[in-house]
Amino acid sequence: MGIAMTVLPLKPGIIYGPVDSRRLGRSLGINLLPCGYKLCSFDCLYCHYGRTAVKSLRPAAAQFAAVEAVLSAVGAALRSRLDIDFLTFSGNGEPTLHPRFGEIVDGVRRLRDEINPAVKLAILSNSTTVHLRPVREALEHLDAPILKLDAGDPVTFARINRPVPGLDLDRMIEGLGQVPRLLVQCVLIGGSASNTDQAALEALLAALRKIRPSQVQIYSTDRPVAASGVERVPPVLLQGLASEAEKRIGAPVRAYWAEA
């Protein structure tokens, strides 16, 4: 049975949360993207923010928050002494699309070091800019670079992630292999467009063996999504897939799901 078509609202500002994360504990989000619409290089079937309004790899700089505004908001949040484990770049689409992403990472890192060094830095990224050296250099400064890979073959990639035209999956996989301390997240779904059939899983495992991440995190969709026909992969199957994948790729694989 497909998941109901009711999605979450977009983030209204730069800072949001803290949220209780299955993987990051108490996480305070940093949204570098526009507040009025979703801007991404993907239009994933399972995205709980709904359809992508602007799908691009080269969006206009005027659409983004100013660096000064981001650093002011992050500084204020850190000085408030919120009980958080992570500051996480995420938000209304793909955070690395911000044209001054590296500068922002450097600034946030300095503020973290000055105000609350115990807080760690993370990102939830879709990997579409990881082939770019400046992006990889910025990612090296994060404690938890969590980057997505849902498919190892072009057909499944196109069906699940619905990328911007011209995006090269092989180049993306090559870029992922160059990120130190990389954590790869894989969202597995069933239904009319699935990445859990044998051929798709074999291609994904082959890509993960090539990338050699420090850890793989697999989960399914536990929230409403925009596309019809998307089916949740149950926890018992996720656990089995994690166990098998760990044997096959030689890296720790952890399964996550929301408790009922």
Image (tube, grey):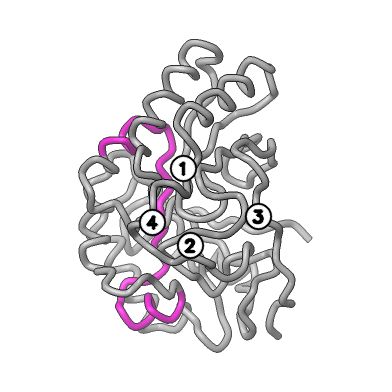
**Spatial separation of the CA atoms under disc 3 and disc 2:** 31 Å
Identify which amino acid the numbered label 3 is placed on. Leu
**Spatial separation of the CA atoms under disc 4 and disc 1:** 20 Å
Residue 151 coordinates in the image, percent (x, y): 37, 71
Q: Which mark is residue 10?
A: 3
Residue 22 coordinates in the image, percent (x, y): 63, 47
**Spatial separation of the CA atoms under disc 2 and disc 4:** 36 Å
For the residues carrying marks 4 and 1, which lies nearer the camera in this image? Answer: 4
Q: Which mark is residue 85?
A: none
Within the image, what quadrant is residue 84 found in?
Answer: top right
Mark 3 is surrounded, within 10 Å at the Cα level, by few (under 14), some (14 to 19) or many (20 or more) other residues, namely some
| Residue at 57% in and 71% down | 51
Residue receiving disc 2:
242
Q: Earlier in the sequence, mark 4 or mark 1?
A: 4
- Which stretch did the figure color magenta? 137-160
Residue receiving disc 4:
59
| Residue at 63% in and 64% down | 48
